[in-house]
Image (cartoon, rainbow, N blue to C red):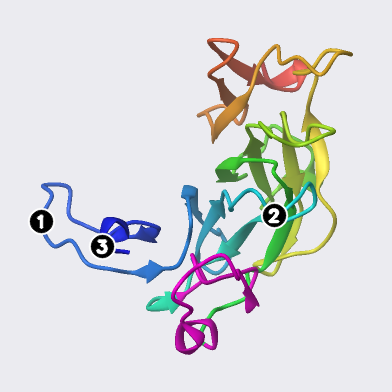
């Protein structure tokens, strides 16, 4: 655990690098972060652990509470104990916060961005886009897409829908792997793709 010091956490700091402090911990791999437009709450997408089977552990997105602990490495998705970790820490497991929204096992969910633009239809306004880099050890593969999750009143309100796909061929080989997602000044969605070595821009025809 000494090697994990300062990792699996979110630290705010000033632009000049000063004032670093611990904001939240127990987040195995928090990647994309954005502030939810209605409440102003910080949300993050988290890429969870492997080697517990094809259907565990779900990656997730969650609002982030200051001083909150989210389980890593002692438990996952709340207080589900990872028995591989020694020594156990039941005191920390008892504090572990259950994430707000599961994004599926081994999706490698990375980028997250709330939609503040107006180019897309009203159903997208205020919702979250998540870039899913895709599994490396799951059969069948999972992820390799960008999903959209609707929000209302600062909370998710439905199942994720596939917004951008086509990154896998019929043999399960990757043409591309989405990483980060950002909304540009004209309301289109930008998607970085490290396998395809591209940045994709998705926009309605009228908004191009």
Q: Which residues are magenta?
A: 69-94
Per the rendering, the mark at residue 2 is: 3
Majority secondary structure in the magenta region: loop
Per the rendering, the mark at residue 18 is: 1
Q: CA distance from mark 2 to mark 1?
A: 39 Å
Residue 112's place in the image compared with 193, above or below, is: below
The reply to whether discs 2 and 1 touch (Cβ–Cβ < 8 Å) is no
Q: Earlier in the sequence, mark 1 or mark 3?
A: 3
Q: Residue 128: image x %, image y %?
A: 66, 49
In front here: 82 or 6? 82
Neighbours of disc 1 within 10 Å: few (<14), some (14-19), many (20+) = few
Check the image and name the residue furthest to the right.
170
Which residue corresponds to the image point at 28% horizontal and 56% vertical from the top-left? 3
Which residue corresponds to the image point at 74% horizontal and 55% vertical from the top-left? 56
Instruction: Please name which of the two marks, 2 or 1, marks the residue nearer to the observer.
Output: 2
Determine the secondary structure under disc 2. loop
Neighbours of disc 3 within 10 Å: few (<14), some (14-19), many (20+) = few
Determine the secondary structure under disc 1. loop
Tell whether 38 sits left or right of 106: left
Neighbours of disc 2 within 10 Å: few (<14), some (14-19), many (20+) = few
Q: Does residue 11 show up?
A: no
Which residue corresponds to the image point at 70% horizontal and 48% vertical from the top-left? 125
Q: Residue 31: image x %, image y %?
A: 47, 46
Q: Earlier in the sequence, mark 2 or mark 1?
A: 1
Task: Find out whether residue 153 is within the magenta segment.
Answer: no
Residue 15's place in the image compared with 70, above or below, is: above
What residue is pinned by disc 2? 52
Tell whether 141 sits left or right of 177: right
Q: CA distance from mark 2 to mark 3?
A: 24 Å
């Amino acid at each position: 655990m000494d090697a994990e010091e300062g990792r699996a956490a979110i630290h705010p700091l000033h632009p000049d690098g000063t004032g670093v402090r611990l904001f939240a911990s127990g987040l195995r791999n928090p990647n994309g972060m954005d502030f939810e437009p209605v409440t102003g709450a910080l949300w993050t997408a988290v890429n969870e652990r492997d080697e517990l089977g094809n259907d565990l552990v779900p990656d997730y997105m969650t609002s982030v509470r200051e001083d909150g602990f989210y389980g890593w490495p002692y438990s996952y998705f709340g207080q589900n104990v990872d028995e591989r970790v020694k020594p156990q820490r039941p005191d920390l497991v008892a504090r572990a916060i259950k994430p707000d929204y599961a994004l599926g096992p081994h999706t490698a969910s990375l980028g997250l961005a709330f939609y503040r633009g107006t180019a897309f239809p009203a159903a997208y306004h205020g919702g979250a886009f998540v870039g899913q880099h895709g599994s490396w050890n799951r059969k069948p593969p999972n992820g390799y897409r960008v999903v959209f999750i609707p929000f209302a009143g600062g909370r998710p309100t439905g199942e994720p829908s596939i917004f951008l796909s086509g990154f896998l061929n019929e043999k399960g080989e990757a043409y591309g792997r989405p990483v980060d997602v950002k909304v540009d000044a004209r309301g289109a969605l930008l998607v970085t793709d490290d396998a395809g070595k591209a940045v994709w821009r998705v926009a309605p025809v009228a908004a191009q």
